[in-house]
Amino acid sequence: VLPVVALVGRPNVGKSTIFNRIISQRLSIVEDTPGVTRDRIYAHGEWVGKEFSIIDTGGITLDDQTLNKEITGQAEIAIEEADVVVMIVDARVGVTPEDEIVAKILYKSHKPIVLAVNKADNLDQRQDIYDFYTLGLGEPFAVSGVHGTGMGDLLDEIVKKL
Ligand code: GDP
Ligand code: MG
């Protein structure tokens, strides 16, 4: 059984983009299976020879009406299922109340957490991520899911905690 990495965060921070980027590091294994929904939730990842399963909790829809219940439910699933939880936030939006709610749940879980600050597409944005220390989850890792920058350092940190 492979260790499990779960991606959490409020809608639109870039979970699916980062998920796709991580699984595409292993192109030979990832296949396009006809009939499989576009929002894949589980996949196989690998980095520096370490293999893991990865879950995009944003693809798990829960029947709760409120956004807060949906994202906290996804965070609880991530804590339950994962060996390492990757919390994703948005560099361009900054820390939001929803981010603080998710961070608090993760912090209390005592699971290994990696904080990824996505949409840090340029140097200024990569250098302006210190506000995210206030989430209490340790060092923020600046990434751009769209451009791929920072993904190596993020994956190094994830596999270190597996
Ligand atoms: P999710 O709801 O958390 O799964 O977020 P998505 O992966 O669907 O991304 C939401 C939007 O943010 C899409 O329009 C993406 O193209 C955009 N996005 C994702 N990553 C980045 C990034 O690194 N930089 C920028 N500028 N946009 C991004
Ligand atoms: Mg998504």
Image: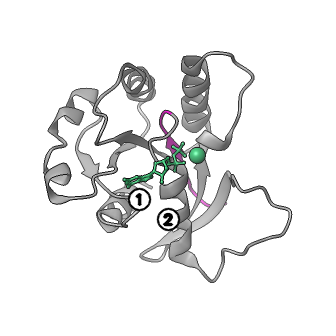
Would you say the beta carbon of the disc 1 residue lies within 8 angstroms of ligand 1?
A: yes
Q: Which one is nearer the viewer's eye here, 80 or 148?
A: 148
Query: What residue lies at 15% left-to-right and 39% top-to-bottom?
Result: 130
Q: Specify which label sits upstream in the sequence, 1 or 2.
A: 2
Residue for badge 2: 22
- For badge 1, the amino acid type reads Gly
Mark 1, other Cα within 10 Å: few <14 / some 14–19 / many ≥20: many
Q: Quadrant of residue 96?
A: top left
As drawn, the label of residue 145 is 1
SS category of the residue bearing label 2: helix
Q: Which one is nearer the viewer's eye here, 126 or 7?
A: 126
Tell me if residue 3 is in the magenta stretch: yes
Mark 2, other Cα within 10 Å: few <14 / some 14–19 / many ≥20: many
- For badge 2, the amino acid type reads Ile
As drawn, the label of residue 15 is none
| Depicted 98 relative to depicted 61: above or below | above
Residue 54, position as x, y percentages in the image: 58, 56
Q: Which one is nearer the viewer's eye here, 143 or 83?
A: 143
- What is the residue that sits farthest to the right in this orientation? 35
Image quarter hosting the N terminus? bottom right
Query: What residue lies at 37% left-to-right and 67% top-to-bottom?
Result: 148
Query: What residue lies at 15% left-to-right and 44% top-to-bottom?
Result: 128
